[in-house]
Image: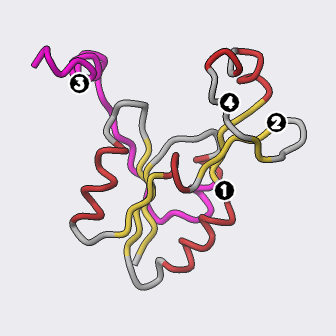
Amino acid sequence: MSLIYVTGPSGAGKSTITPKLNERGFEAHDADVDLCAWYNRETGLKVEYPKLVSDRQESWQGLHTFLMDEELIVKLHERSEGITIFVLGNCSNELEVAKKYFDKVLCLEIDEDTIVVDQNPTDH
């Protein structure tokens, strides 16, 4: 079958769609939770994301990047021979990984007004 990647900006609905796909019987993964991690740009080593906001200021962000774990994607790609698997997320190396392993790439779009309304449910 196929391995499908769904990307898009924060707030476009990727995390909302993932459990909906699972409920409908598809295998779907939230890449931000299951398949990506923070890495030190210089060493390439995986690091923990700081829990305190004060510890993840601009200087920390400049030294680290959020990447998809290619080894995990390879395993999903191998398993997708007989089924359709969805991966939903957004990370720095998504295009590089998508070109190698994904059969289809979809990009969700959302306008700024919709994002603002959705983040303020009392405004509906």
Q: Magenta includes 65?
A: no
Distance CA(mark 4)–CA(mark 1) = 19 Å
Circle 2 residues within 10 Å: few <14, some 14–19, many ≥20 = some
Circle 3 residues within 10 Å: few <14, some 14–19, many ≥20 = some
Label 2 vs 4, first from the N-terminus:
2
Q: Secondary structure at mark 4?
A: loop
The residue that disc 2 covers is 41
The residue that disc 4 covers is 50
Circle 4 residues within 10 Å: few <14, some 14–19, many ≥20 = few
Distance CA(mark 2)–CA(mark 3) = 34 Å
Label 3 vs 4, first from the N-terminus:
4
Q: Residue at x 47, y 46 (%)?
A: 89
The kind of residue tagged 1 is Asp
Rendered-image quadrant of the C terminus: top left
Rendered-image quadrant of the N terminus: bottom left
Residue 105 x/y as whole percent = 44, 54
Label 4 vs 1, first from the N-terminus:
4
* Of marks 3 and 4, the one in the foreground: 4
The residue that disc 3 covers is 118
